[in-house]
Image: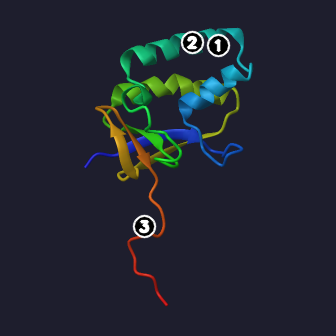
Amino acid sequence: MTGFVRYQSAVPNRHWRHPGVFALANGLRHDGMLEDADRDWLARANARAEEHYADPTTVAPDCYDPVLHPGARSWFRDGAASCLQLCEPYLALLDRYGVAWVELRTRTPGHVVHEDPVQVVATPFTHPADWPFRTRP
């Protein structure tokens, strides 16, 4: 069985979500916090990533829809070495700017709503629908 990897914020945002590595890096750019060299690097890195890997929303436009798929998040397949390597300089960028992040690994990312050769988008399991144990009186 394959595993999955996700890099996300260690601290939830104001919506109590944990944005992923690319959202965090782009958030630094959006808020004008990047130095010029890092902003230029990020533009080039994003262009390379878009050229080589499909954004799930270009294939499944509703995969992150908050009503249809609440809490959906993307996970890289742990065998997708090129994607994991792609993340390394983004993580280094986050480190330089003091953005706390965590690496999550799992074999069960949730209910898969989209998948391709390098990633899945999945909604988290919920209680009680996915709780495996009987309820005790």
Q: Name the residue that disc number 3 marks.
A: 129
Relative image position of residue 136 (x, y in whole percent):
46, 87
Q: Residue at x 63, y 44 (%)?
A: 10
Contact between labelled residues 1 and 2, with CB atoms less than 8 Å apart? yes
Of the numbered discs in the image, which one, if any, rests on residue 3?
Answer: none
Residues 136 and 99: in front is 136
- Nearest-to-viewer mark from 3 and 1: 3
- Under circle 3, the secondary element is loop
Crowd rating for badge 2 (residues with CA inside 10 Å; few <14, some 14–19, many 20+)? few
Instruction: Measure how far apart labels 3 and 1 are at the Cα level.
Output: 44 Å
Instruction: Measure how far apart labels 2 and 1 are at the Cα level.
Output: 6 Å
Q: Quadrant of residue 83?
A: top left
Does 89 sit left or right of 54 as displayed?
right
Of the numbered discs in the image, which one, if any, rests on residue 39?
Answer: 1
Crowd rating for badge 3 (residues with CA inside 10 Å; few <14, some 14–19, many 20+)? few
- Under circle 1, the secondary element is helix
Instruction: Measure how far apart labels 3 and 2 are at the Cα level.
Output: 42 Å
Contact between labelled residues 1 and 3, with CB atoms less than 8 Å apart? no
- Vertical order, 117 against 72 (above or below): above
Outermost residue to the left: 1
Q: Name the residue that disc number 2 marks.
A: 43
Amino acid found under the numbered disc labelled 3: Ala
Amino acid found under the numbered disc labelled 2: Ala
Relative image position of residue 45 (x, y in whole percent):
51, 15
Outermost residue to the bottom: 137
Residues 27 and 58: in front is 58
Amino acid found under the numbered disc labelled 1: Arg
Q: Residue at x 28, y 32 (%)?
A: 117
Relative image position of residue 70 (x, y in whole percent):
51, 49
- Nearest-to-viewer mark from 3 and 2: 3
Does 95 sit left or right of 67 as displayed?
right
